[in-house]
Amino acid sequence: MVSGDDSGRADSIAPAMSTADAFACLATSISADAARRAHALHLKADPEVLHKLRVALRRLRSLWWAYGPLLDRKDSELQRGEFKSLADAAGKTRDWDVLRDLLAGDRSTQHAFASLLESVDEHRADALLFSRRTIGNAGVEQILQRALTGARDQLDLRATSTTLVGFAEERVEAAEKALKKRVKRAVSDKDSGYAALHEVRIAGKKQRYLLEFFSPVLDGSHQATIERLTSVQDELGKLNDLVTGEAILREYSFQLGEPKAVSEAVSYLEDQKRRRMRGVHEILRTTW
């Protein structure tokens, strides 16, 4: 059984550890957090639990990416895909919550979209049932335990002369290079769309998670970098919320039953999205 009582913190790994032992330490901790969230969701329909479950699953995907060079490629991709599927199931409800927050952001919009918000609430309730049912039937703890055991067996069989410190430095550097490449692509073209910024968001999260995982064995303090990445991620997250909200409105425009209100809401979110994109591009140019 997956066990542990922290939330994926990496402060228990040490330079003297093998790369396999460090993986087991990190994976056990984060898996325990994910299993707890899944169990809590079964007991109570709490949106915050869904959010934290998604975060834990994202951290696991990043950990499997970090150890990718030492794992079977096909199996690693399969496990990361399973983690993503679970996160997507949890995200169905989160997406409706995001849309509701955007449309009820202030008194004026709350009043303008009052009837639409009632329909949003109904769909959100259905999404919550779907999320809870899908995650509850998936056997999350078994998936996590199987993934952890399989990866650990592979690491034990693939002996490496690289120290944990050396391995951590290599993988953090690889994540940093990938992030810089995506930032350069996003800011070099002033007409680059959201897809390029979404790639920056994904790469930024990956680097931040790896720094959090491996900070105890890396030279110097990386807290300033983590805080900078978190700040940029917050801005990219706000943009992602707008994109997500607009996408849901377009996808469910007929089911929501408020054609005029939906059209006005889409226009409102499009305007907010354009403004946010300009701001994010400027932040990326000045930050990197």
Image: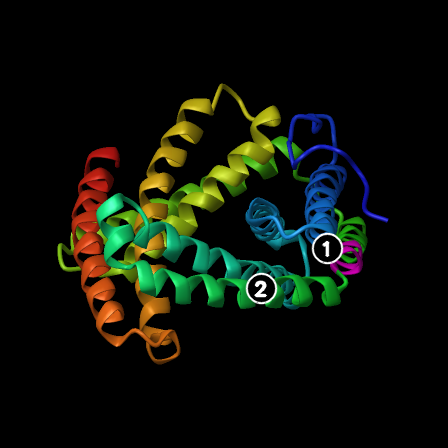
What amino acid is found at the position of numbered circle 1 in the picture? Answer: His
Q: Is residue 143 magenta?
A: yes
Looking at the rendering, the stretch of residues picked out in magenta corresponds to 140-147
Crowd band around label 2 with a 10 angstrom C-alpha radius: few (<14), some (14–19), many (20+): many
Rendering quarter of residue 261:
bottom left
Mark 1 = which residue?
42
The C terminus is located in which quarter? top left
Q: Taking 125 as reference, is 205 above or below it?
A: above
**Colour scheme shown:** rainbow
- The residue at 76%/34% (across/down) is 5
Q: Taking 280 as reference, is 124 above or below it?
A: below
CA–CA distance in space, label 2 to label 1 = 14 Å
Q: Is residue 115 left or right of residue 84?
A: left
Closer to the camera in the image, 217 or 144: 144
Residue 256 drawn at (x, y percent): 37, 73
Circle 2: element type: helix
Closer to the camera in the image, 98 or 100: 100
Rendering quarter of residue 205:
top left
Mark 2 = which residue?
89
What amino acid is found at the position of numbered circle 2 in the picture? Answer: Ala
